[in-house]
Image: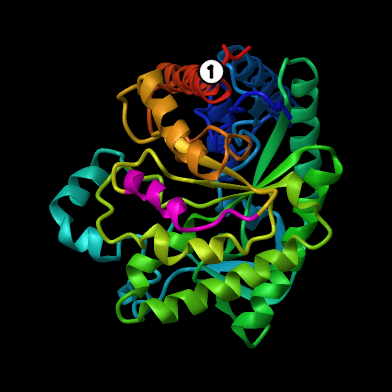
């Protein structure tokens, strides 16, 4: 790791090229496709993507999540045994906890969301309930080996510090699953954690960083409180963080990153859980780097949390200093300002520059145009250089 400048990274998901999306549609729709041609396009697309990240100034790069299916979380459903899908019952469809259309934000801004979804603002939902009917076992060994090989080959040919693969956290992997096997929430979560650990370890054992994505940990608050109290929600979070730490056993913390956000959709978020109410729980996750939204205008003010919360020794903060949800390209001076104010609190050596969330919610839904994505990442890199110059008192290399 560089010791005289702020390194750059991002959350992982990047806009897929059209030549790849055509295959991903066929895979998700269970239609026939040329497997060899798909694998060749996937490898080529990742190589091009990593090269462009390096040229843009990103130090720790990803594969863009190109090897995943429908989205950042539900890809795991194709890599597990012990589950199946069935249609929702009429009663289940009335439960806001089970419906992606539920929650007070969607109720209070119903007119907006009708237009938003009609114009493609959200990934179309397949109306099916996930049922756990047996022991959860990881079956995605071939897929994760392929993802690892593609990223490592691309990184080897690029001038970067390292590569990371995003994976899903226990809280976000099978949200609102109906358990018909384990008999208790805790047993189910720890069974899931043991299955996910195989993917986490495969990534780290291959010499890459593993990033655990956990958007559902925060976004469920909107639907849970009320009727739950904040205390009840925190208990729900604690159990899932315990499960995540179980999955992380044996993984060096410095090789692992943990990402939370308040959802990637570019709509109102006025009922989000405040960072101050969960930051102590987040810091209990046994990783070396914490990534969180800090450019989002609903949460940017929360950088002040770090004025009173002590960052544990040896840990790194990777605040989002670029928003994924607007086509406005941030000025590098603003990026630098966001980095400097946190670095002056927690220490310049403990800060990395990142984005709020991924630029593509799924292979089929991008948040910004690809040209905007690259302009934003370029601003991120330039802002980190300017912050480094201010913090170290010299022009960053």
Residue under numbered circle 1: 389
Q: Is residue 278 left or right of residue 114?
A: right
Tell me if residue 308 is in the magenta stretch: yes
**In the rendered structure, which segment of residues is drawn in magenta?**
299-312
**Element type where label 1 sits in the image:** helix
Q: Residue at x 65, y 24 (%)?
A: 59
Q: Position of residue 357 (x, y in %)?
A: 47, 40
Q: Quadrant of residue 95?
A: bottom left
* Residue 226 at x, y percent in the picture: 30, 77
**Where 249 falls versus 235 (above or below)?**
above
Residue closer to the observer: 26 or 298: 298
Image height of 314 relative to 191, above or below: above
Residue 186: x and y in percent read 64, 81
Look at the picture and state if 200 lies above or below 236: above
Depth check, front residue: 27 or 6: 6
User: Can residue 363 be found in the magenta stretch?
Assistant: no
Percent across and percent down for residue 8 are: 58, 28
């Amino acid at each position: 790791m560089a010791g005289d400048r702020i390194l750059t990274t991002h959350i992982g998901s990047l806009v897929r090229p059209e030549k790849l999306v055509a295959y991903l549609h066929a895979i998700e729709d269970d239609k026939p496709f040329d497997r060899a041609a798909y694998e060749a396009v996937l490898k080529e697309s990742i190589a091009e993507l990593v090269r462009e990240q390096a040229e843009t100034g990103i130090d720790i790069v990803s594969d863009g999540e190109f090897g995943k299916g429908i989205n950042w979380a539900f890809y795991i459903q194709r890599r597990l045994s012990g589950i199946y899908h069935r249609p929702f019952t009429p009663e289940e469809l009335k439960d806001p906890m089970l419906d992606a259309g539920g929650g007070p934000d969607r109720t209070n801004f119903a007119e907006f969301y009708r237009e938003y979804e009609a114009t493609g603002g959200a990934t179309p939902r397949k109306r099916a309930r996930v049922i756990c009917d047996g022991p959860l076992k990881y079956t995605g060994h071939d897929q994760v080996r392929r993802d690892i090989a593609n990223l490592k080959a691309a990184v080897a040919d690029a001038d970067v510090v390292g590569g990371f693969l995003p994976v899903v956290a226990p809280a976000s992997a099978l949200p609102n699953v109906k358990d018909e096997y384990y008999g208790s929430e805790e047993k189910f979560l720890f069974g899931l954690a043991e299955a996910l650990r195989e993917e986490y370890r495969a990534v780290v054992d291959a010499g890459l960083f593993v990033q655990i994505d956990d958007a559902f940990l925060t976004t469920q608050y909107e639907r849970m409180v009320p009727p739950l109290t904040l205390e009840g929600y925190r208990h729900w979070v604690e159990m899932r963080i315990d499960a995540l730490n179980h999955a992380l056993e044996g993984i060096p913390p410095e090789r692992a990153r943990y990402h939370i956000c308040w959802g990637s959709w570019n709509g109102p978020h006025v009922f989000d859980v405040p960072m101050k109410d969960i930051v102590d729980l987040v810091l209990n996750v046994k990783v070396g780097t914490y990534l969180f939204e800090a450019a989002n205008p609903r949460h940017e003010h929360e950088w002040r949390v770090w004025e009173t919360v002590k960052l544990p020794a040896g840990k790194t903060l990777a605040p989002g200093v670029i928003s994924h949800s607007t086509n406005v390209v941030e000025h590098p001076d603003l990026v630098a300002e966001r980095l400097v104010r946190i670095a002056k609190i927690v220490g310049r050596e403990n800060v990395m520059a990142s984005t709020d969330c991924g630029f593509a919610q799924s292979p089929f839904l991008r948040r910004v145009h690809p040209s905007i994505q690259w302009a934003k990442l370029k601003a991120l890199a330039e802002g980190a250089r300017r912050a480094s110059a201010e913090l170290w008192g010299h022009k960053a290399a």
